[in-house]
Amino acid sequence: MYIPRHNEENRVSVMHSLIVSEPLGTLITLGGSGLFASHIPMILENDGSQFGILKGHISRANTQWRDFVPTVDALAIFAGHQHYISPNWYPETKEHGKEVPTWNYVVVHAYGPLKVVEDDHWLLTNVEKLTNIHESASPIPWKVSDAPEDFIKSQLKGIVGLELPIRKLEGKWKVSQNRTTRERNGVIDGLTKLNNPESLAMKALVQKI
């Protein structure tokens, strides 16, 4: 990923936080038919390594688990907040007009060798962990054990587990770091006036600079 120095985020804890908060990853692999991408929720676990390990699962009908080159690292992309930035928000636009639109965003790229897992216990554990994480905010959380055991066993036969030990982690926080304080204040004001959840989330990131 192209990362200008002022946009580089190399704190592992910050990158991990984005993965945990935005767990729907885009998993990209190289196979015999070319590049292949699947969008799957993933769990970040501490396995004692520097960057941790990602775990998830895909449908058995999805050919990605069979058609990938094991000697080429897979890539998992986790995208955070993003927003269009208008030239009208820069004070300089009214002074000389030499401004163009841009896009602010935060993203993490995780690279590593992909491993396929077909163990029933592993699959059940993964499904239970994913469910417990994303049901935790519900007043009455649904649990995998709420469904009939035979039904769950039949569903597990239709999925395949994936592990991605992270060997390389890249973070890019493009949040107006290359702008002057005056220009950033203009961006903050423009995002504030939009007053929607995504604009306010980006405003908070720009304000942290």
Image: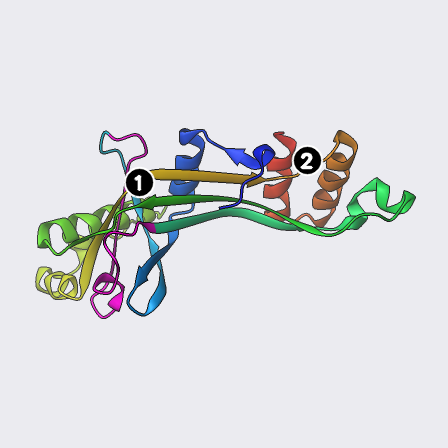
53 displayed left or right of 15: left
Residue 144 sits in quarter: bottom left
Up the image or down, 5 lies above or below 157; here it is: above
Q: Observer-nearest residue: 130 or 6? A: 6
From the top left corner, tell me how far across and down residue 173 is, in percent: 55, 39
Residue located at (9% from left, 59% from top): 149
Which residue is denoted by mark 1 in the rendering? 166
Say which element carries label 2: loop
From the top left corner, tell me how far across and down residue 170 is, in percent: 44, 39
54 displayed left or right of 14: left
| Measured Cα–Cα span from mark 2 to mark 1 | 30 Å
Which residue is denoted by mark 2 in the rendering? 178
Question: Of the residues shown, which amino acid type is indicated by label 2?
Answer: Asn
Q: Which residues are magenta?
A: 49-74
Q: Quadrant of the C terminus?
A: top right
From the top left corner, tell me how far across and down residue 205 is, in percent: 59, 36
How many other residues sit within 10 Å of disc 2, few (<14), some (14-19) or many (≥20)? few
180 displayed left or right of 138: right
